[in-house]
Amino acid sequence: MAETTRMDSANTGRAGGAASAVIRLHCGFFSALERAFAGWFNGFAARLAFTSVLLLYYLNSGWNKLGEGLFGFLDPSVGAFASILPSVMEQYGFNPAAVPFFPWHVIVLLGTWVEIVLPVMIVIGLFSRISALGMIVFIIVQSYVDVAHHGLEGKFVGAMFDRFPDAIIFDQRLLWIFVLLMIVVNGPGRLSIDHLLRRRVG
């Protein structure tokens, strides 16, 4: 009986030692991985994902809102007004010239510039946190306009925790915002102009 008890204790000790070794290996590996990627990877990966998924989407959208000619950035197209202010455009007979400059023209100008300037700033890593925060606000406003004024509804809007992962608003754009939040919280990483400026300033 005593011999059996000693064998059981020995087996338990070996099992406990093996479990401790696995835990130490696990913790050591992932601690080393965390140290290796600390300070640069999260922001860089978020910017890379943004560049791959959203840069051309927003640049194309913003570019199509510009008016013709060299100063088209000061004179948005009819499509810009229809996209950003559909109910206001309907109120003024779809004639941008009849729409009051303040605040409606100002809103359209800002909306058009944001779609071009902020994505570029995020990609190159310049004032990245502020730019990402601005893009989050833009996406929220964009989603509101799509639902309230462009008639997006039902499965296209979706809902959180509904087991369907493909809705435009509560699935797709929630993930967009998450990527941008990674930049707001972690910064753009070392491969950015922000990092170079921070090192220069000290």
Image: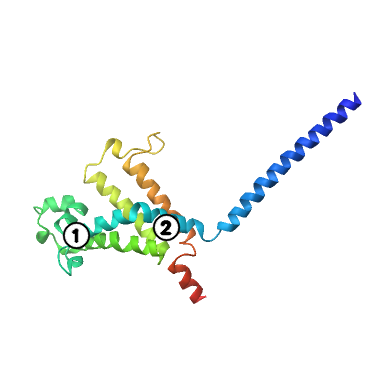
Q: Amino acid at mark 2?
A: Arg
**Disc sitting over residue 47 in the figure:** 2
Query: Quick check: can you spot residue 185?
Result: no
* Residue linked to disc 1: 104
In the rendered structure, the answer to whether residue 162 lies left or right of residue 185 reads left
Q: Secondary structure at mark 2?
A: helix
Front position among marks 2 and 1: 2
Lower sequence index among marks 2 and 1: 2
Residue 125 percent coordinates (x, y): 41, 64
The relative height of residue 131 versus residue 197 in the rendered view (above or below) is above
Name the residue type under label 1.
Trp
Compute the Cα span from label 2 to label 1.
32 Å
> The N terminus appears in which quarter of the rendering?
top right
Residue farthest along the top direction in this orientation: 1
- As helix, strand or loop, the secondary structure at mark 1 comes to helix
Residue 114 place in picture, x, y as percent: 29, 61
Which residue is outermost to the right?
Answer: 2
Left or right: where 37 falls relative to 19: left
